[in-house]
Structure formats: structure tokens, C-alpha cells
Amino acid sequence: MRGTPDPDGKQSAGREADARTVIPLLMPAPHGPLAGVEIRRPGPSGPHWNGSRAALVSGAGGAKEDFLPLMHRLAEAGHRLFAVDLRGQNETPGLDDPAAYGIDALATDMAVAMTAACARKPVHLVGHGAGAVVAATAVVQAGSRKRFAPSTCRSLTLVAPCWDGPMTAGDAQSADWERLVARQHRGGTMTDERRAVIRQRLARSHPMSLRHLASAAAAPDLVAGLRAEGIRILVVGGAQDPLVPADRTRELARQLGARHSVVPGAGHLPHHDNPDALAAALNGFWAEEGVAEMWQK
């Protein structure tokens, strides 16, 4: 796997990172391996470990490293966390075939990769932005048995989901990706250190991946498909998100029959802006009794 975790992710987690095991991953998938990272407490962790696992998927202009502050906090609660770069995103190599970047293809790749990483154990699935659409599509794919997928999905969390494709096709053609990513940050601004990280990330991402994720939107039947699966869903919005305002996430939660949570002091990146609040919301959601285990063998 090329590179190392982004420095801003490590620094955001502070000294907490020293008490965790951070493992770079290269996970097999139909269109080629996906780069990922696992964070967990030190100790037994083989395939027969029966604790809580969660898989996290980022969206347009994002990367697995954006989740590091959140992952370190969730690891403190005893979860094992896996984050992934999708096809052509950040450290995952891209292809020159547009078909590899369709939502269905991205969802299948992600599901296969996480099956391997999680040893076919139950997993809580978390998607951000366009990655939320990818994660939701993987749930419906698995339910219809049209694609290979993990044996069990315990829950689905949609963080600032780009359900209606808030980055337009016109934006996706723009060369000013740094400006587009800045829109995702609270107040539309980034520190110089964060800007350097984003520039490096964008430089190694495949242009097709950026364009497809930026213009991604949920299929018309995705809400109905998720409701039919009966999976427990949490929809999370950032209180100061200019791309996906909290009233939109609230309405999506209503349509899905899902729980809804708003992260204070957060823009489009709650896991970056306020990881403590998002970790508390996820820990509470995952700890509730009666979690339905879907995607049975």
C-alpha cells in the first residue's frame, strides 16, 4: 500500500493513537485490491474474535484517513474499525474503465473487500457523503443476492449522505477540486496543513473516481430497497453542513423509517469536525438491543 495515514488524522486523535494498533490493509476486490486501514485495541484479534466490527466508507474528495479521529475514539469503546479507499480514491489504484466507478461496482468492491477484512463476521456499516450511497447500495445488493457480500450487516449509518448528488455534474468537471473539497469543511476553510494533505490526496486520486463520486446520487428505488431489507438505520447530519443541511437528513430519515441525529459544531465532515459527538451517537446506536442481523448466509 502506498503512503502512510494522513498527518492531520493522526494529530486529530492526539496521543490516543499511541494506545491503539493501526494496521494498513490491502483487501481483495473484483476490480483489484482496495487500500484500507484497521484500528483496534491491542490484544487477541484473529478471525474467531466475536466483538463488534465496523466498516467506514468515504465519498467524493474523501479518504479513509478522514475517519482516523473517529476510529480512535470508537476503538476505545472496544470496536474494531476498518476504513477503505474506494476504486481510484487516494491510495487505491484506479482504472481507465468508467464501469469500475458506477455505484453498483463500487458497492460490490467494497462489500467483497470488507468480507475479507472482517472474516465474514457481523459488521456495522458507515458511509459518508457519496460513500453513504455506496454503503446503502451494498445492503440492497446483498439482500437481493445479486452480488457477493458479507454474511451479516448489523446496522447502516448514513453520515451527511449525498442522496441527491449535491455536487453537480458541472462541479465534477471543474479542475478546482481543492475549492470543492473546502466546501465540505466547517466554514468552507481549511488550515494550511489540511490543505497540503488534500492536495496530495487529490493528486493521487483517479480523475474518473472524483467525477463519478461527485455526481453520484441514490437510485430512485434505493429507499424502498432499504425499507424492504428491514435493517436498522441511523442518519446523521452536521449542524452547519452547507451541502446536506440537517433538514434534508431529517427528511431522509423519515423516508427510511430511521433514527436521526445532528452533530453540533460540524459541517459536512462530522467525523473530522466533532468526532467525540459522532462517536457518542454511534456507540449509543450500536449498543441498543434488538440489532437485526441482516445479510444472512
Image (cartoon, rainbow, N blue to C red):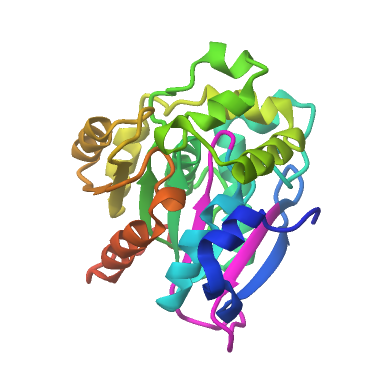
Image spot of residue 12 (x, y percent): 52, 59
Quadrant in the rendering for residue 285: bottom left
Q: Is residue 49 magenta?
A: yes
- Total numbered circles: 0
Farthest residue toward the bottom? 43
Q: Is residue 148 visible?
A: no
Magenta region = 35-61
Residue 241 or 157: which is nearer the viewer?
A: 241
Quadrant in the rendering for residue 254: top left
Residue 262 or 131: which is nearer the viewer?
A: 262
In the image: residue 291, left or right of residue 199: left
Residue 210 or 72: which is nearer the viewer?
A: 72
Image spot of residue 71 (x, y percent): 50, 64
The quadrant in which the N terminus is found is bottom right
Image spot of residue 202 (x, y percent): 69, 34
Quadrant in the rendering for residue 235: top left
Question: Residue placed at 73% from the left, 46% from the top?
Answer: 92
Question: Residue placed at 64% from the left, 62% from the top?
Answer: 37
Q: Is residue 232 magenta?
A: no
Q: Image height check: is 281 above or below 17?
A: above
In the image: residue 201, left or right of residue 82: right
Q: Image height check: is 100 above or below 230?
A: above
Q: Is residue 295 visible?
A: yes
Question: Residue placed at 55% from the left, 16% from the top?
Answer: 171
Farthest residue toward the top? 170
Question: Residue placed at 60% from the left, 44% from the top?
Answer: 194
Image spot of residue 217 (x, y percent): 45, 26
